[in-house]
Image (cartoon, rainbow, N blue to C red):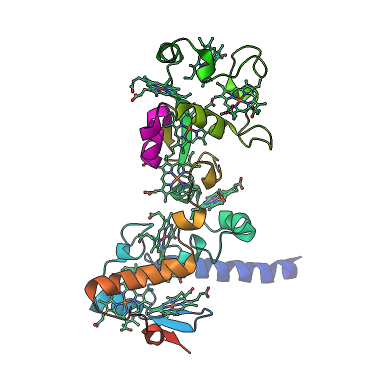
Amino acid sequence: MHKKFLPLSILLIVLLGLAVSGYMTSPDKPKVPVRILLKNSGGKVIFTHIKHLKDYEIACDNCHHERAGNETEPLPCGSCHPQAFDQDYVRDHINSFPDETYCVTCHHAELGELNFDHEAHEDYADEDCQTCHHGAEIEEEPQNCTNCHTSAGTEDIPSIRTAAHDRCVTCHEEQFEDEMKGCNTCHKVKNMKKFEGDTTPCSQCHQNESKDLVPNRLDAFHNLCMDCHKELKRGPYKDNDCDKCHLR
Ligand code: HEC
Ligand code: HEC
Ligand code: HEC
Ligand code: HEC
Ligand code: HEC
Ligand code: HEC
Ligand code: HEC
Ligand code: HEC
Ligand code: HEC
Ligand code: HEC
């Protein structure tokens, strides 16, 4: 019996020792890399990380925009800026984040209540219900649009978004011209401080594609590096400067 427990006890003591020494020497801050090797199809790039922040005196949040300060380890850029916004991204990105506070950087809004005074609008339309509702051939009686118009819509029946907007726009053109700023006059947009599981596709609200809203990996790196170099007129950024960053 005792012989069986001996190796276990030793293991326990060793583990305890490791835990204690680990605790005493545990680094409070993440290791800030000196240089970073970025492999890519354009030729490897050696990024002089420490030089950029110490010699060129650039603060962390110029580049690591997702977290202010340097308390927490920043996420790799690629977890938010993928090669492509494809099916793989949709499947994998959910596991790329340490917790749900990150989700709302992108899944950031939810359409809340509708701010629409129906009674007042009967007046505005001179009691002509068909300004918005269909005639009897479709709507036997005026009723909620969502009884027939769904979120996704069908080939024959437009989505609730298209259906409603098409009617409202006849009198509210300016609000739609304001694009994202105009939404709030009719929709009370909820700002989600906490992720509540709303993963409505971006295109449900935005005319732009995901890749125009969140740049892909190539654009994210090129824009970050080049915008700053261009602005300061230092470091490589000109059209024929490719090999000042890319080793071929
Ligand atoms: C000039 C831009 C720039 C500045 C300034 C900068 N970083 Fe970075 N940092 C980067 C880039 C780019 C990467 C590579 C990220 C990647 O590979 O996805 C990186 C990577 C890192 C990593 C490694 C992350 C990982 O996934 O391994 C840490 C930690 C880090 N930076 C911390 C800091 C801290 C702390 C500061 C400020 C003291 C700072 N950085 C300032 C651009 C910068
Ligand atoms: C937690 C997710 C997340 C991480 C990590 C992240 N980004 Fe972003 N990034 C975004 C989102 C969302 C936007 C678009 C909205 C905005 O402008 O804030 C964006 C926009 C950008 C833009 C265009 C807007 C601008 O500020 O110029 C650049 C360039 C960029 N990111 C570069 C980077 C680089 C380089 C890294 C790594 C050092 C990085 N990002 C890490 C989410 C992220
Ligand atoms: C400006 C456009 C517009 C006009 C004009 C209009 N409606 Fe509506 N109506 C709507 C919209 C949008 C909805 C669904 C959204 C909602 O619930 O408020 C709706 C919903 C309804 C409903 C269902 C309400 C419920 O809660 O079940 C009835 C009934 C209705 N309308 C009757 C009428 C009648 C009768 C008239 C004419 C006197 C009229 N509407 C004029 C846009 C309009
Ligand atoms: C009883 C079912 C039903 C209800 C309720 C309904 N619709 Fe429709 N709607 C349809 C069908 C079916 C079509 C497609 C046939 C067509 O194009 O005329 C359609 C088409 C439309 C179209 C595109 C064609 C057009 O008429 O301009 C708009 C816009 C529209 N609906 C708006 C609305 C609005 C706004 C409401 C609520 C105020 C509403 N609908 C309520 C069934 C309905
Ligand atoms: C027949 C013309 C007409 C149509 C169609 C119409 N509206 Fe209006 N709407 C008006 C008028 C007139 C006002 C009051 C004057 C103003 O505030 O501009 C108004 C005011 C509003 C307001 C208050 C605006 C504010 O600035 O606070 C909202 C919200 C609104 N409408 C929503 C809608 C929605 C949603 C639809 C489509 C279902 C719609 N309207 C369709 C004429 C219309
Ligand atoms: C003039 C008023 C008005 C404006 C401005 C407006 N909407 Fe709407 N929107 C509506 C109405 C009315 C509905 C139908 C709501 C219902 O009956 O459930 C709707 C529906 C939607 C839906 C469908 C919601 C669902 O449940 O599937 C989306 C998405 C949407 N709007 C996005 C937007 C965005 C994004 C903007 C700004 C670019 C915008 N709307 C501007 C009035 C407006
Ligand atoms: C950098 C931006 C970004 C971040 C951060 C992010 N997402 Fe996404 N997510 C997207 C994009 C882009 C899509 C594709 C949706 C589209 O095409 O409109 C998506 C799609 C999804 C989908 C599939 C929705 C559908 O109906 O297809 C789910 C589920 C999802 N995300 C959950 C999460 C969760 C959970 C988190 C946090 C742990 C998260 N996302 C963080 C950008 C992001
Ligand atoms: C429920 C509707 C809705 C959904 C879904 C949605 N957004 Fe938005 N988004 C908005 C609204 C509304 C604004 C404008 C907010 C404001 O101006 O206060 C906005 C603003 C933005 C901006 C800033 C744009 C600018 O020009 O300043 C970015 C970037 C963005 N959204 C990215 C995304 C991405 C990526 C997704 C999908 C993962 C997404 N959004 C899903 C409604 C939505
Ligand atoms: C916020 C400003 C800023 C950002 C962001 C930035 N740089 Fe720089 N970079 C500089 C400055 C300042 C210099 C110094 C040029 C000089 O000494 O004349 C420099 C110099 C360089 C040089 C030449 C000298 C060296 O240190 O190797 C390279 C290569 C370089 N940067 C690559 C990058 C890459 C890759 C990125 C993106 C991951 C990047 N930089 C992002 C400001 C920036
Ligand atoms: C300031 C430094 C810098 C300059 C100048 C630069 N790049 Fe890049 N490039 C990068 C970085 C950083 C990446 C991203 C590495 C990664 O994805 O990890 C990259 C990525 C790429 C990729 C890879 C795309 C992929 O999906 O693998 C290509 C292709 C590319 N660059 C081409 C060019 C060309 C062509 C030029 C000149 C017109 C150029 N680059 C100039 C820093 C630079």
Residue drawn at the location 40% of the way across and 15% of the way down: 124
Q: x%, y% of residue 158?
A: 62, 34
| Total number of numbered discs in the rendering | 0
Residue drawn at the location 45% of the way across and 62% of the way down: 75
Can residue 149 be seen here? The reply is yes
Magenta span includes 118: no
Can residue 26 be seen here? The reply is no
Report the front residue among 222 and 168.
Answer: 168
Magenta span includes 172: yes
Main SS category, magenta section: helix
Please tell me in which quadrant of the rendered image residue 154 appears.
Answer: top right
| Quadrant (top left, top right, bottom left, bottom right) of the N terminus | bottom right
Please tell me in which quadrant of the rendered image residue 21 appears.
Answer: bottom left
Left or right of 15? Residue 229 is left
Q: Is residue 70 above or below residue 170?
A: below
Residue drawn at the location 34% of the way across and 73% of the way down: 226
Q: Is residue 121 above or below residue 235?
A: above
Left or right of 81? Residue 222 is left
Q: x%, y% of residue 62?
A: 30, 64
Residue drawn at the location 56% of the way across and 45% of the way down: 201
Please tell me in which quadrant of the rendered image residue 188 appears.
Answer: top left
Q: Is residue 49 above or below residue 84?
A: below
Farthest bottom residue? 248
Q: x%, y% of residue 246?
A: 43, 84
Q: x%, y% of residue 200?
A: 55, 42
What span is colored magenta in the figure? 171-188
Report the front residue among 107 and 18.
Answer: 107
